[in-house]
Amino acid sequence: MQSTAVPSITLNDQTLLPILGFGTYKLNGVAGVASIVSAIRSGYRLIDSAFKYENEGAVGEAVRQCGVSREQLFITSKIPGLRHSYNEALYSIEESLYRAGLDYYDHYLIHWPNPSQDLYVEAWQALIEARKRGLVRSIGVCNFLPVHLQKLIDETGVSPSLNQIELHPYFPQQEQREWHQRYGIVTQSWSPLGRANEIFDEPAIKSAAQKHGKTIAQVILRWHVQLGAVPLPKSTSAERQIENLSIFDFELSVEDMDSISALGRPDGRRKDQNPAYYEEY
Ligand code: A2P
């Protein structure tokens, strides 16, 4: 079994989080289980799932098949927009544990704030309760803008341990990341490779890759880690899973970092998923 160790950081609730994880969006069923097992055997310990991905069952099955003990793994799922009211959020977490066949999740997150619905504080209160009951170890959010984060903190006094947001070289989210840092919230990156599209042709990234003898994907993932963000690359291929893990033996220079961040643009989101108005249920 080839394995690459991923370092961890300590979250604001003292939970240890690996600084790189495995995304599972669209990894479903038998093939999904096989991809997740292969990722865990390659060295991934943080596995990111969601009610909306319809693969909590596949993640649970992979946990049982992988041969790595449960305590070494860090499993995440997320509350969907349809279950933000307090009672529904709590039983949604309980059902999510049944689906995965797990006793607890390491992380549970609110998937989208859905501001027009305006129930995310209730969902947050349910997560606080779920943590008290031992159903989840650490609680956080995804796609929350500072205004949403501030409301959670003001109304409950409890800060999320992290915020998972869209982040890649076309959308580096500097201000949002700085806000997180001020409040002790870790930034996690979804779509860290920008889904491996035009970004892979960018000369700034290509030249850094050439200079360091690394691939484009490795340079992009290393850029996330050096920004202090936790990327969640997804790959169905065992080779690319290992490639994406092998980023802890080189360092990008300040110039490399700046030239990659300079690819950012205000409308850099892959789709028009601005949490100020974009909602998912
Ligand atoms: P595949 O599953 O065939 O490897 P993101 O993590 O930004 O959402 O991107 C996911 C996409 O990136 C998937 O289509 C995945 O394809 C592709 N991908 C993942 N790792 C690599 C890599 N190292 N090189 C090229 N493409 C990759």
Image (cartoon, rainbow, N blue to C red):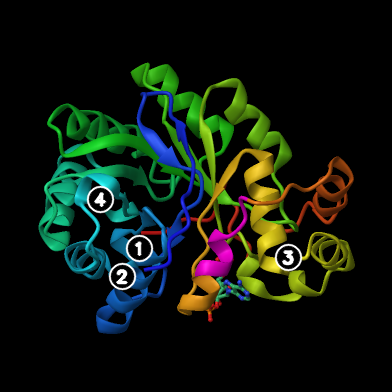
User: CA separation, marks 1 and 2?
Assistant: 5 Å
Q: Quadrant of residue 183?
A: top right
Q: Which mark is residue 195?
A: none
Does the image show residue 61?
yes
Quarter of image, ligand 1: bottom right
Q: Which mark is residue 37?
A: 2
Query: Closer to us: mark 1 or mark 4?
Result: 1
Q: Which residue is mark 3?
A: 214
Kind of residue indicated by mark 2? Val
Kind of residue indicated by mark 1? Ile
Disc 3: CA contacts within 10 A as few (<14), some (14-19) or many (>=20) = some
Examine the rendered structure and indicate whether residue 268 appears above or below residue 91. below
Query: Closer to us: mark 2 or mark 4?
Result: 2
Does the image show residue 269?
no
* Drawn side of residue 39 relative to residue 128, left or right: right
Kind of residue indicated by mark 3? Lys
Q: Pinpoint residue 131: horizontal percent, then vertical percent.
A: 21, 31
Circle 3 SS class: loop
Q: Which residue is mark 4?
A: 83
Q: Quadrant of residue 14?
A: top left
Give me the residue at 41% from left, 39% from top.
Answer: 17
